Image (cartoon, rainbow, N blue to C red):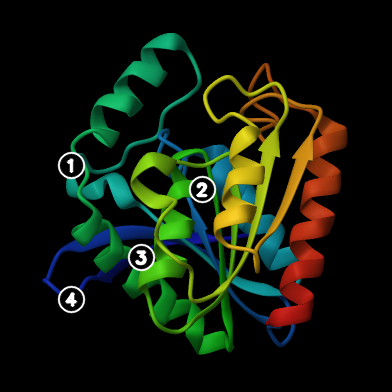
Amino acid sequence: MGAMTSLTAADGHRLAAYVAEPKGAPKGGVVVIQEIFGVNGHIKAVTDGFAADGYYAVAPALFDRVQPNVDLGYSPDDIAKGRDIRGKMAWDTVLQDCAVALALAASAGRVGCTGYCYGGGVTWKMATSLPGLTASVGYYGGPWDELKAEAPKAACLLHFGALDKMIPTSLADEMKAKHPGITTHVYDADHGFNCDQRATYNATAAVIARRRTLAFFEALL
């Protein structure tokens, strides 16, 4: 459904982005933020899914700053490669790249964002830092030690997995206590439960979380 395009950030950096357009008039825009595996087949499928549900969807290739065309799978070697690239990222340039994706999505109206794992943390950072964002949805994101004190300016929904050893569910209560206006949900699922290409995929949790995400966007965009 979608296609790759090129965006230019405020500092002149050119990055790739996967863009999927709805068939009819868009309900709004959605920025889809990758995991540590780049804009791979799964992220493209997620982006296509939001377009099928009526949104103009944009998935910026954030890792282009460090290494262009990152498209990883989910093997231990891929995880190690993705973590290495993630460690070389800087928030200021990440936000520049998110901002240009947000600007493109805004051509369709109000904009929401959603992200997974690494992208879940990025969506929170977007909500605290970028003007023009209406709604933010994070799936099992982080790193919360860096982010949890920052107050979001956009409406936020966070999904957590009860079996997730990397992102403990205690954070759901902690984040809600720090930021009472946000919405949190916990599922009987592991980290990565939304990705049908991972061993930790949980179809029930993924469907319920997606329904809640779409309802959140429907109400706000």
Q: Pinpoint residue 13: horizontal percent, then vertical percent.
A: 15, 64
Query: Which residue in the protein does label 2 denote?
Result: 120
Q: Residue at x 48, y 58 (%)?
A: 123
In-image side of 213 versus 42 (left or right): right
Q: Residues within 10 Å of mark 4 (few under 14, many from 20)?
A: few
Precedes in sequence: disc 4 or disc 2: 4
Sequence-earlier tag: 3 or 4: 4
Q: Could you tell which of marks 1 and 4 lies nearer the N-terminus?
A: 4
Q: Are marks 3 and 2 in contact (CB under 8 Å)?
A: no
Residue situated in front as seen by the camera: 60 or 83:
83
Q: Give the total of numbered labels.
A: 4
Among the two numbered marks 3 and 1 on one chain, the one whose residue lies closer to the N terminus:
1
Q: Identify the mark nearer the N-term, 3 or 2.
A: 3
Label placed on residue 98: 3
For the residues marked 1 and 2, what is the alpha-carbon distance in whole angstroms? Answer: 19 Å
Q: CA distance from mark 3 to mark 1?
A: 15 Å
Say which amino acid is labelled 1. Val
Instruction: Give the number of the mark in front: 3 or 2.
Output: 2
Residue plotted at (79% across, 35% down): 187
Question: Residue flagged by tag 3: what amino acid is it?
Answer: Cys
Q: Amino acid at mark 4?
A: Ala
Q: Looking at the rendering, in which quadrant would you find the C terminus?
A: bottom right
